[in-house]
Amino acid sequence: MKHQHWIRSAAIAGVIALLTTGCSVLGTGKKSDIDAPPTTGAGADAKTTSAAVTIDMIEDNSSQMTVYVKDGKGFVAPLSLGLPKTVSVAKTTLEYMVDGGPVASMLPSGFGALLPKGTKVISLNVTSDKRAIVDFSKEFLNYDGANERKILEAITWNLTSFPTVEKVQLRVDGKDLKEMPKGKTPLDIPLARSMGINIEKAEDAEFGQSTPVTLYFLNQNDQNYKYYVPVTRLVKRTDDVAKAVVEQLIKGPDQKKGLAAVLNATTEVKSIKPADGVITVDFSNKFLGADQKAPAEAMQSVILSLTENTSFKQVQIKVDGAVKPVAKPAHINPAKL
């Protein structure tokens, strides 16, 4: 990710005044471990796929789709829900991000939709340069000013989960939206995933002299539903983004924000090597749990974080040189209903 692009995107979002995603491990509230190779599929390559794009039919009239909503701690988080099958999957996901709409009965405890009540998605078209043009009804402007940034994050990260979308342009009643009316966030250039999500800054980083890395930590609601939360952290400028990602996962979440770490603080990295489209991370045995198994939650977090921040779509995890097979993720944060 280019530094100049990041600085511009951060300024757009009011930071200086910051997902191939998918996982089916969570959703039961129970921790699981992976210690045996899969019998079919990608094997140890640990290939991730976009939950919003890989549509697995779970019923005759519904499909598993990803929406971005706000959790009980105020984080923007992805949830995979069984939504009605439609011609326009992307448009449907946006419609199920409207407060007071049909998604209300589908969300786990503590979660809420971010798009204002009554908002209608008039149209959604994708251009040849991978720009999604979304036309909302006038109700879109009736939002809580405190949620302005979160709304933009949710829309942008939702739509850019699709491989055909890289940028997002907003309209209201057919007219381009030049800025958000309450917080005055400028929208003179299309929004992109590089704007980040749930932004925070490392203590030793400085705005304008930093590199953004998006990390997947764990959260849990009052009904013991566990789910991943993406957090974009500004760290000291570096060209080795993969190394920074793993280091920050080991460092863990900001303790004041209530998220849970995915890697033990004593975890050691022996090497990170890219080759033939696969990035391989070799941990010491401190990566293993007390039962000497590789925790599934930790491995999925590493996969989600590395594929989010690099061009690699496959991640291989080793412990002391031995491959630890990882099941191929299908959807991120399947909702527990």
Image (cartoon, rainbow, N blue to C red):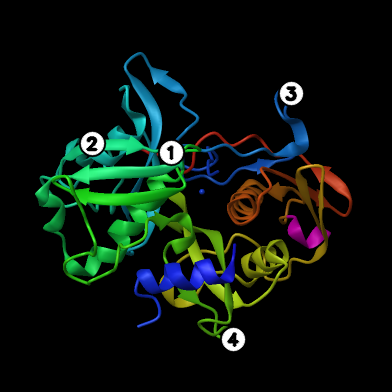
Q: Nearer the viewer, mark 2 or mark 3?
A: 2
Residue at image position (38%, 39%) is: 336
Q: Amino acid at mark 3?
A: Thr
> Any magenta on residue 286?
yes
Which numbered disc flags the more N-terminal residue, 2 or 4?
2
Q: Nearer the viewer, mark 4 or mark 3?
A: 4
Which numbered disc flags the more N-terminal residue, 1 or 3?
3
Q: Amino acid at mark 1?
A: Pro
Q: Which mark is residue 334?
A: 1
CA distance for labels 1 and 3: 23 Å
Q: Secondary structure at mark 4?
A: loop
Q: Amino acid at mark 2?
A: Ser
Do the residues under discs 2 and 1 have CB atoms within 8 angstroms? no
Residue at image position (54%, 40%) is: 23
- State the residue in front, 167 or 217: 167
Residue segment shown in magenta: 283-288
Residue linked to disc 4: 204
Which numbered disc flags the more N-terminal residue, 2 or 1?
2
Q: Nearer the viewer, mark 2 or mark 1?
A: 2
Which numbered disc flags the more N-terminal residue, 1 or 4?
4
CA distance for labels 4 and 3: 45 Å
CA distance for labels 2 and 1: 27 Å
- State the residue in front, 78 or 93: 93
